[in-house]
Amino acid sequence: MIPALRGAVVTIVAVLISFGVMYAICTGAGAGASPAILAAALAVGLARRPERLEPHTSLLKGIALPLVALAAGAVGLTFRAFPPLGAALFCAGISLSVWLRAFGERGNIVGRIIALPFLAMLIVPVRVETARGPGSTAVLVIIAGVVAFACSAAVQRLAGGASAMPAERARKSTVAGRMAAQMLVALALAFTVGMLAFPVHWPWVVLTAFIVCSGAAGRGDAVYKAILRVAGAIGGTLVAALLARVALPGGAASAALIFIVLFLGLWLRQLNYAYWAACATLIFALLQGSHGLPALPLFALRIACIVIGALCGIAATWFVYPIRTEHVVRRRVANALAAMQAVLRGGNVHDLAHHIAQLDRIAPSAPKHRALLRETRALLTYVTAGGDRKHAGAELRRLGALLKEVPTRK
């Protein structure tokens, strides 16, 4: 829990500084607080998974993030003028961000840079209350991107560039293409159902579909994420309904509550994703408000949106280039054993940390193969700690034999 706590502290500091700096700029410009909330939302994504602090990485992010934030802001305005076009542009932008992650480290960086502002704009549409026209809105959105990047980079550097999360590797082009197609279908379904059935609350459907489909390793993983998302969302929405009956002293108290919930979510996410789902749902509810609806109907409406969004994500992963859970297990274990064999031949032992994280990632959604995953992980940890190589070699052969027993149904 200590690394998770440290990561949460680093992230929340970057978020608070980004919000404070941007809020001061908005106050000076006579604008509302939504650009400051946008900067904070961007800082969450930037600080939670930072890349190495190298000049080319910093330059790429520093240039691309404000420009993509501006593009996302334009899409947000399109939602208000012509929602179907805004939905199409959003689907294309997010799917592109997934597909780009097949192209090495820079593809990963650009993909995340594209996704962050689009998702932030979905959660916090920028509405600048100023008489200076749309030009001021564009400038403030760009500044929000610059502030989020600069504050996150500065805090990361002061914290030693550490991250509580493992580095993300580039996916194969076929895997990235499959995930991009699944994301496109999931979002298209979510927008269609959400905008037709829930004209006001459709972002809840879309956001849930994105969460369930994003990075889903296979059918079982999507279902597992959906269960955690719905369970956490019920808790978060229930708390939001209870808080709706409490009159907070003012805007400062509401902001403090949001930041406290965000910190708890970032910290407890490493323990179980359901905690993050609950906290994120509560934050989303606090930002959106009640729209004048009574607490109980609003609670039921939000839960319905979340369940439908989860079903959209599951449908995409089950019917668009689906991958069975046993195939995921075979691939992850085979890759881990190959990496361990390379280490036993003199390779880099640090490479095993990535495979340990990959095994941990799919273990909860593969109960039938949990023993194989657990034993493989234990052997990777044993080799990483410098265990006896002769014993490790014998275990490697035993696990290889067990791997052949995993079904290969198509």
Image (cartoon, helix red, strand yellow):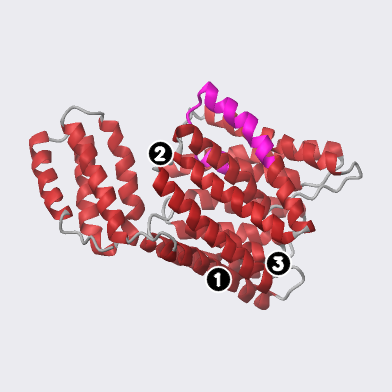
The magenta-colored residue range is 44-69
**Residue at the spot of label 1:** 308
Callout 1: few (<14), some (14-19), or many (20+) C-alpha neighbours within 10 Å?
A: many
Residue 120 drawn in magenta: no
**Element carrying mark 3:** loop
Callout 2: few (<14), some (14-19), or many (20+) C-alpha neighbours within 10 Å?
A: few
Instruction: Please name the residue shown 26% across and 44% down the image.
Output: 335
**Element carrying mark 2:** loop
In the displayed structure, does residue 170 sit left or right of residue 359?
Answer: right
Q: Position of residue 166 (x, y in %)?
A: 40, 40
**Residue at the spot of label 2:** 169
Q: Which residue lies furthest to the top in this view?
A: 55
Please tell me which residue lies in front, 252 or 55.
Answer: 55
Callout 3: few (<14), some (14-19), or many (20+) C-alpha neighbours within 10 Å?
A: few
Q: Earlier in the sequence, mark 1 or mark 2?
A: 2
Mark 1 belongs to which amino acid? Ile
Q: Is the magenta stretch mostly helix, strand or loop?
A: helix
Residue 52 drawn in magenta: yes
Q: Position of residue 192 (x, y in %)?
A: 63, 67
**Residue at the spot of label 3:** 246
Q: Which of marks 1 and 3 is nearer the N terminus?
A: 3
To which quarter of the image does residue 133 belong? top right
* Tag of residue 297: none
Q: Do the residues labelled 2 and 3 touch (CB within 8 Å)?
A: no
